[in-house]
Each structure stands twice: as C-alpha cells, then as structure tokens.
C-alpha cells in the first residue's frame, strides 16, 4: 500500500508541474530567437591557373547557422558542403568554367555571383628551331645574328659575346660597326621563359681587315709595288680557266696614271669599294670597284670647252714644238694622283689650255677632291707656279709626269720635259695638303739646264725619316765642283728642298751626251733590313745598270769609280733599243725589273746588299718594257703582274695594240700563270695599250688603265 501511495504523489506533482509550464501566474520561462536567412558578405573571386594546378573558391556569409553550401560549375552541382570549393587538378576542359554557390538554412537561401575559372595551358620551354650562323665581314661593317625559337611567350633573349652578356632582349643581335678586336669572337644566345631555357650553338664572327688601299703610285711611299694583303688571288687560281676579264669601264681619255683603290667608302647611305681613274681628257672618275656600271659614282671634269678651257693639244706642247710622240692627242692628267685616307681627299694635277679673248694660257692646277663626291676642298684648286733663282716654271715647256707624293702633310709634285723638246728643268714643288699653299721649291739644275724629274711616271719616294728621293734625267751636273746642278743623279732631299746627299755615276757626262737618262726609270726605297747595309735604295735608267745605293752614305760623285754598294749591268742598255722605262718592284727579298727589249727578271737581295739573278721570265718585252706589281698574302702566294704595252719607241701607232695583262709566279718568274690573250674568242682582251701603265691589284681584282677604258680582271663567276 505504501508503494501505491508514493506513486500517486508523484503523479500529482507531475501534473502540477505540467500545468505550471503553460504560463500561469508566477511563470519564469523565455522565447527562443528567430532564424535569419543567409547573407553573403564576401563573394567568390575568379581564378586563373595553369592546367594541372589547383584552384580554390571561397565564400563568406552571415545568418543563422547551420548553413548548407551547394557549389555549381557550369550549372551542375559540384563540391562538398563547405564554404570553400577546391579543384585539386585543373584541366584545360575547365577553362572559362562558371562557378557559383548557393547557401541555405531553415529560414531561406542565397546564391553568390558567378565567377570564372581560367585554366591556361602549361608553358612550353623554348626550343631553338633556327640556330645563329657564323658571319665574315670586313672591319667597320655591321653584322647581324638571329635566332628562331618556339615556346610559350613571352620569351627573353640574352646574347653573349665571348661569354660576356651583350645585346638587347631581341631575337636579333647587331654589331653596328665591327672592329678588328672582334675577329674570331664567339657568339651565342640563351632563350628563356617561365618553363625553362635553351642555349644556341656557339658561332664565330670573323672580322677581316679592310682590303689594302692603293693610295699612291706603286702602293706605298717606298714605291715597292707590293700588296701583301691579297688573300683572294693565288698562283693556284690565277689561270685562264678560273681568272679573266670581268668588265670594262668607259672613260673619256687615255689612262696614263695608275688607278687608285679605297675600300669601304661611304657615299651617301651606301658603302662602296672605289677605284679612281684619271684621264688625259682632264677627268677624274670614281667607280664602284666591284660591279660593272655605265655610270660612275662621280666624275669631275676640269675642262669647259664652251668657256675656252680644254686639255692641251699634244701639238701645242713645248711651245708648239710638240710632235705628239709621248702622249696623243692631248695632255691632261698624266701623273698618278695621291689620296689622303685620313681626310678623304684625292690630290691631282690637271693641265689645261685656257683661251680668253686673244690670250691663250697653259696652266697646271693642283686640285683637292673629296673622294666621296669629287667636290673641291681646301679652297682649291691653285695654279702651280715656281721660281728658282732667275728661272721660272713655264707650264707649256714642262710635263707633270711623275706620280704625286704625300708626305707629312705636304703634296710633292715633279716636272720634266715634253719629250726633250725646248728648254726645261727638273722641278720638285711642295704644297700644303691642308691649305694648298706652296711650301717648297726645288730646281735640279737652276744654274744649268734640264735634269728632268720624270722617272717614267714613278713618283718621288720617301723613307721613314721623311727624306725624299728622286732620280734626274740627263742635264747639267756641277755638284762635284761646288755647284747646285744635278743631272743624272739620285738625290736625297730634306723636306725643305735642300740636298742631304746624292749619288751620281762616274760616267755622268757620257750619259748626258748620249741621252742615257739615269732618271728614265723609277726606284725603290727598301724597308729597313738586317745585314751590312740596312738602308738601301735601288734604281736604274736607260743604260741598263742597276744601282744599289746605301742611303746612309750615297757616295756622291767619284771620277775614279762609283761608290755604290753595287753597280750591276744586268738589263738591256739604251737609249735606242733598251734600258729601264719603268719602276722595279720588291717582295720577300726579291727585286723585279722589266727593261725594254728584255725579260722580266727577279733578283735575290743578299745579306751584303748586293743583287744576284734569281729567275727570268719567258718572253722579251718590246718598248717600253713594264712596271711590275706584286700581290701576295704575306710571304706566300706571290704573283708578279705586268702590263705588256707593245708600243713603238716614242711613237704612237695609228692602230694601237691591246694591252696584255700577264701574271707570273713571284718565286720563279719563268712560270707564267696567265695572260689575257690565252682565252678563246678574245674573252679577256683589254683596251688599247698606253706606255708606263701600272697594274693595280686589290681585293681579288686587277685594274688596268687603257685608252678610254679601265679593264677589270678577277676570278670568273
């Protein structure tokens, strides 16, 4: 009974508690807060990733928890119930996918902005598809290297020159002006992007020296006639199969002056190798040296027939006594010009006849021309005048035959006779190269007569100390008795025109009487040598005797016998059927002569300063013989070049034979390599021959001055 009573009590108590919870008087219970729908406070953001990378989107919301999250990609439900949605390994198919999320609770839901997933392709490391290539240029020229590569952009480029970073961030690398120091430089480039890099092959830049310029008669002031920087022409390729006439350039007169050559001249915006040609019609031409053209780069003429200015008719030379035996039909420019490469100036002497009313004048003028335009420079031209003692230079009585000498800022100009007609003197005049003002006058026989300085066109020579050397023709000689007349003499002059030393053969009087000019030939000032006589000069004249002279003690005149190092009667003798009418050449201790009615001869220079015959050419040359030039690559591949003129002695034929270019092995001139008459059908025929022509060899070509044309030879295409 007790158990039941207790149960009843408990039931009553529970009933009381139950009804009390419904809110009667004295109720102490609270009302729960309302549920709030989600509100997004931080939207998801668009993502850009590389394929294979992960991408995570996130959202932040406020409202009554708990939230449920449903992410969508391109409208399809994806992801887990989380405020973040991660794609752990993206693919290119997901590129531009649209992403959003719906957030919900018991009170409602909200949807985020739609954002974009950008999936970029993975970058491809660079791969070089076209390597740079090696280049060969001439010093001063530009050069460009290039590379082509694949790979994901952007690509960066780093060029290297001999291992040092160089160039700009570009697929091309340009050196605008190469230098000799860059010869054999190693060039490479590294191409990079975010995926990696690739390195090119290493290539080589070869910077060749400029072809040797020919700026003066017989190549240099020593008159050696050698070009030892000729790398193209060799004894192996100078033959009728591979070498021949390339083209001819037409000019307006005879070319007695040696053509000159300057490489890499900038004319306007173009670079040209130029060959310069002067004519007896008083013109100077600049031609592109490598290509045929009907038109020169420029031409300057010093005549104006409409104004009464012409070249000098040959019959009017020597005060009207000229018989046109030396040059016909006119005299204009005979002496080889000279070029100052440092200022780009060509100096030339032009001879003109000028008629004003009833007055006729004959004038020599020194012109200074720009080698790029032909325009006059330094206030030129200037008329050439000179007085020595009581005598003056009379232009109509004198011929400006020797080439010009440029030495230490002075242009030296020599004069002789018009074929021994009338009265004349040997003159050497000096003019400032920068002002064209006369600075020196020398007369070889001021108290006598004659002693012409003509040398068959050879220019005065000079040594490294600034001494000047000329050889005079027949004329008065009084130096042995205290006089100042130097006929048939090799003279050493100071720059001011005073005689420093001289050599005169013992038989000078005989030479003068028989017209055996010592000065019919040119001379060489040899480079400094080792041995008994380190400073030598070699020359010869009409009598066919080669004189080897010690420049430190030339020997002067000795009635009992010559005081030369050697007097070698090894050439034919003149004046009517032999003698030297040209200049010798020098290479590799060999000296080359071609006298009239004689062979090409090579002489070995011995340690004691004497010469001995080394080899002899295969043919005899008619008047006037020849002036050889030598091309070589240092001490190898030597070639002796001559122009065979075949003109009668001092007679111009009505039908002028063609000049013949001949080439010989310089180590043995008995071996002829080529002559321009070998090829069939006159393929290599030159223009009409002129006396005393000198071949100019430069950069694989040989330039031959003819009557009214320049003939150009080289390796055949």
Image: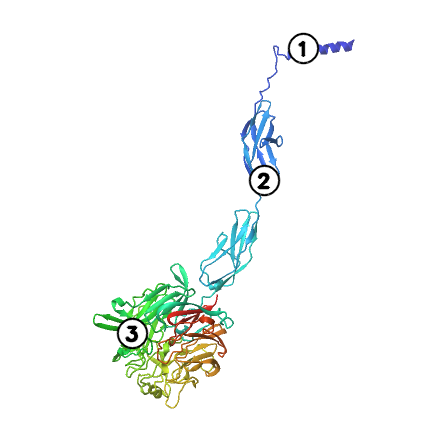
Against 126, residue 508 (above or below) is: below
Q: Looking at the image, which residue sits at the far right?
A: 1
Q: Is residue 709 above or below residue 534?
A: above
Alpha carbons under labels 2 and 3: distance apart: 92 Å
Query: Residue 116's spot in the image, x, y percent?
Result: 55, 35
- Dividing the picture into quarters, in which one does residue 464 lie? bottom left
User: Mark 2–mark 3 contact, CB under 8 Å?
Assistant: no
The residue indicated by pointer 2 is 92
As measured in the structure, the alpha-carbon distance from the residue carrying label 1 to the one carrying label 3 is 158 Å
Helix or strand or loop: what does disc 2 sit on? Answer: helix
Question: How many angstroms separate mark 2 from mark 1 (CA)?
Answer: 72 Å
Judge by depth and name the residue closer to the eye, 475 or 242: 242
Left or right placement of residue 48 versus residue 425 in this view: right
Do the residues under discs 2 and 1 have CB atoms within 8 angstroms? no
Task: Determine which quarter of the picture holds residue 267.
Answer: bottom left
Q: Which residue is labeled 3 in the image?
A: 313
Question: Residue 343 at x, y = what percent?
Answer: 36, 66
Across and down, in percent, residue 590 comes to 47, 79
Residue underneath mark 1: 16
């Amino acid at each position: 009974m007790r158990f039941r009573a207790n149960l009843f009590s408990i039931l009553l108590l529970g009933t009381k508690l139950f009804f009390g919870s419904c809110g009667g008087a004295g109720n102490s219970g609270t009302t729960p807060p309302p549920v709030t729908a989600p509100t997004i406070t931080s939207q998801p953001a668009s993502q850009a990733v590389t394929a294979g990378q992960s991408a995570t989107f996130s959202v932040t919301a406020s409202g009554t928890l708990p939230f449920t999250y449903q992410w969508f990609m391109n409208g399809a439900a994806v992801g887990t119930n989380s405020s973040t949605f991660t794609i752990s390994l993206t693919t290119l198919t997901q590129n531009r996918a649209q992403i959003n999320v719906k957030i919900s609770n018991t009170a409602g839901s909200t949807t985020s902005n739609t954002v974009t997933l950008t999936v970029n392709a993975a970058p491809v490391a660079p791969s070089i598809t076209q390597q740079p290539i090696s280049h060969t240029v001439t010093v001063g020229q530009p050069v460009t290297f290039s590379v082509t590569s694949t790979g994901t952009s952007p690509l960066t480029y780093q060029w290297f020159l001999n291992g040092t970073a160089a160039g700009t961030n570009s697929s091309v690398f340009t050196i605008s002006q190469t230098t000799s120091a860059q010869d054999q430089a190693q060039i490479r480039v590294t191409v990079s992007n975010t995926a990696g890099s690739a390195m090119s092959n290493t290539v080589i830049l070869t910077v060749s020296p400029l072809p040797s310029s020919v700026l003066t008669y017989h190549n240099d002031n020593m008159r050696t006639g050698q070009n030892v920087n000729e790398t193209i022409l060799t004894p192996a390729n100078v033959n009728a199969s591979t070498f021949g006439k390339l083209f001819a350039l037409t000019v307006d007169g005879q070319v007695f002056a040696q053509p000159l050559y300057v490489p890499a001249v900038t004319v306007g915006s173009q670079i040209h190798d130029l060959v310069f040609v002067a004519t007896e019609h008083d013109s100077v031409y600049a031609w592109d040296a490598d290509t045929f053209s009907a038109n020169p780069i420029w031409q300057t003429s010093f005549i104006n027939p409409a104004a009464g200015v012409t070249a000098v008719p040959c019959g009017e030379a020597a005060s009207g006594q000229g018989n046109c035996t030396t040059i016909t039909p006119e005299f204009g420019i005979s002496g080889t010009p000279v070029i100052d490469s440092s200022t780009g100036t060509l100096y030339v002497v032009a001879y003109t006849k000028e008629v004003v009313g009833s007055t006729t004048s004959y004038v020599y003028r020194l012109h200074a021309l720009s080698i790029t335009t032909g325009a006059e420079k330094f206030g030129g031209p200037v008329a050439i005048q000179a007085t020595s003692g009581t005598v003056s230079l009379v232009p109509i009585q004198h011929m400006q035959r020797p080439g010009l000498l440029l030495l230490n800022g002075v242009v030296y100009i020599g004069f002789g006779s018009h074929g021994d007609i009338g009265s004349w003197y040997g003159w050497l005049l000096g003019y400032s190269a920068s002002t064209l003002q006369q600075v020196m006058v020398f007369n070889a026989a001021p108290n006598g007569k004659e002693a012409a300085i003509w040398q068959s066109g050879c220019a005065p020579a000079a040594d490294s100390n600034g001494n000047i050397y000329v050889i005079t023709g027949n004329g008065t000689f009084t130096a042995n008795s205290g006089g100042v007349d130097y006929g048939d003499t090799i003279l050493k002059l100071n720059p001011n025109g005073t005689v420093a030393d001289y050599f005169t053969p013992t038989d000078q009087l005989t030479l003068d009487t028989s017209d055996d000019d010592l000065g019919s030939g040119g001379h060489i000032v040899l480079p400094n040598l080792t041995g008994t006589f380190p400073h030598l000069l070699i020359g010869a004249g009409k009598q066919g005797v080669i004189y080897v002279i010690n420049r430190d003690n030339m020997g002067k005149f000795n009635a009992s016998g010559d005081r030369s190092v050697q007097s070698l009667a090894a050439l034919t003798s003149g004046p009517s059927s032999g003698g030297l009418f040209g200049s010798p050449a020098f290479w590799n201790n060999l000296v080359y002569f071609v006298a009239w009615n004689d062979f090409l001869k090579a002489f070995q220079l011995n340690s004691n300063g004497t010469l001995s015959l080394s080899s002899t050419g295969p043919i005899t040359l008619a008047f006037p013989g020849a002036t050889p030039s030598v091309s070589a690559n240092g001490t190898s591949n030597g070639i002796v070049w001559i122009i065979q003129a075949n003109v009668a002695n001092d007679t111009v034929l009505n039908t002028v034979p063609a000049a013949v270019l001949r080439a010989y092995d310089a180590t043995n001139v008995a071996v002829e390599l080529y002559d321009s008459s070998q090829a069939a059908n006159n393929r290599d025929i030159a223009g009409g021959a002129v006396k005393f022509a000198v071949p100019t060899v430069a950069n694989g070509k040989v330039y031959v001055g003819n009557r009214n044309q320049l003939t150009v030879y080289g390796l055949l295409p």
